[in-house]
Amino acid sequence: MVTEAPVRATPQQPRPPGWTVLRNAWRALTSMRTALILLFLLAVAALPGALLPQRSLNQRLVDQYFADYPTLAPLLDRVGAFDVFAAPWFAAIYLLLMVSLIGCVLPRTVDDARALRAKPVATPRNLARLPHHGGGTLDADLDGAAERVRGQLRGWRVAEREEDGGRRTFSAEKGYSREIGNLVFHLSLVGLLIGFAAGKLFGYEGQVIVPAGGGEFCNTGILGYDSFRAGTLVDGTDLAPFCVRVDDFTATYLPTGQPDRYDAALGYQTGADLAAGSADAWRSFPLSVNNPLRTDGARVYLLGNGYAPIFTVTFPGGEVRTGDVQWRPVDQATLLSEGATKFEPPGVTDDEQRRTGQLAITGLLAPTTSGGAVVTSVFPDLRDPEVAIDVLRGDLGLDDGRGQSIFEVDQAQVDSGALVRVARENLVPGQGLTLDDGTQIRFDGVRKWVNLQISHDPGQIWVLVFAVTMLAGLAASLGVRRRRFWARLTPSDQPGRTVVELGGLARTDRAGYGEEFDRLRADLLEPHVVKDP
């Protein structure tokens, strides 16, 4: 005889140290209260990005802020206040918010999905205790009364059940779209954050100045841009290939000088055109401020415009060079512009002689001159241009290995005496001057240029979609009432009659369900209810 030994219960393995702390921290992080706090913190953290200049947008304004506030600016720079959206603390808040929302919304989505598939809850035992209730005796048997209830509850989710004593109950529920809208709102909010993050990771944005009248730009690499801001995962080697050509630019101004309209006649080639070798096949597009060009996943915006004076320099040896470098506006109201057009002496092989013979024409350009001794502009359109220039000769510092602005000369070269002013003059188109070594400089006119912004944001369309669905979900969650209705049918002692008990309950504290319940009760009972003699 074999006797089986009793099976002992295996003792539960102890949880690893710190498990309780991690569980409680996760529960706290994934609560809706924490998500709201993080959303508020994200809004507060973004304020410096709106109030302070950002390096990714305008390094010049950041430098000016350092010059204006030499004590405060370094302190702000230590905490990343001039590069807020790339700061580690901003990324940490953003990531915590995404985790909090996902951990909060997804489990609730699963629970609500199960609730949507579940039948309405059973009829309460005592319907008279509900906020809305009623009843009466119908002049119909149980099947006839049940059919009448089914007819009144069309459009409701209904569960029909049998009870003891031959009684029959109906549980009906309406307003599920409220919960669906609430879930859509929160899921769309998560999608919105993911869309923004995708744009910051995989998107890029650059600006380039292109001369009007045939100037071209091809999106083949970051070196073609005047400024370029890449996403975290963008290295600039895989940009969408396309080319644009600015055939013409027209600016319309009001009599007060306020801009009325900017229009650029644009030609462009898509990546497919370039791959097919269609170098001469240009598509036309009317580019304007509110009408960007969309091609190859990128958008081309018209940001602004300006002017480039055209100078022709005839060197003593007879060599002729022409420069039409863009000058930047210093007064947006009148487009008074400043800049520097630089020339290398041609045909010089000796490095020392070449460096000491470089020229720079700096000064102011007025598109519509005031006509006074001091050159200034009175209107932004190109009507009566004039330049006030200084001609500098010497070493421009181009071989020092340091980057230089195209709009100005290196002031250190001027201060050291390596670059010396040799002439100063006010010129209108057609006029010129002659330097002491015989070099002739002529002001030939002005050429327009446009400032284009090229943006690629793979998350933009999803941001739009999620923003629309978020608003739709919010409207549904605020405008729809979740409500329940019950009916219990009991056979009467009198043949051919049925006792009806009704009850109703709104799952949210909103007015209006009482009227709907009274209407249902009236349609169901009147005029079929049996009157007392």
Image (cartoon, rainbow, N blue to C red):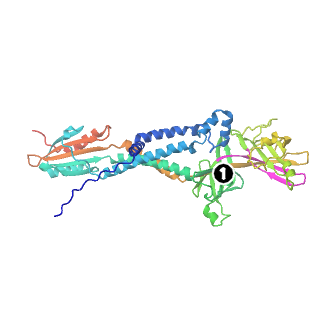
Q: Residues within 10 Å of mark 1 (few under 14, many from 20)?
A: many
Instruction: Label 1: state its secondary structure.
Output: strand
* In-front residue for pair 109/443: 109
x, y percent for residue 335: 71, 41
Quadrant holding the C terminus: top left
Q: Is residue 429 visible?
A: no
Rendered location of residue 486, percent (x, y):
22, 45
Q: Amino acid at mark 1?
A: Ala
Q: Report how many numbered discs are placed on residues in the image.
A: 1
Q: Is residue 215 left or right of residue 90?
A: right
Left or right relative to 440: residue 363: left
Could you tell me which residue is drawn at 65 percent across and 66 percent down?
A: 277
Q: Residue furthest toward the front?
A: 1
Residue at 55% from the left image edge and 49% from the top image edge: 200
Image quadrant holding the N terminus, namely bottom left
Q: Is residue 339 visible?
A: yes
Asked which quadrant contains residue 261, the reply is top right
Q: Furthest residue to the left?
A: 494
Give the side of residue 487 with respect to residue 17, left or right: left
Provide residue 402's location: percent of width, then percent of height.
Answer: 74, 48
Question: Along the line of sight, which residue is nearer the eye, 505 or 385?
Answer: 505
Residue farthest to the bottom, as pictured: 276
Image x and y of residue 487, in percent: 20, 46
Classify 276 as above or below 418.
below
Mark 1 = which residue?
Answer: 264
Image: magenta residue range: 303-327
Q: Is residue 308 magenta?
A: yes
Question: As rendered, which of 206 and 461 lies closer to the eye?
Answer: 206
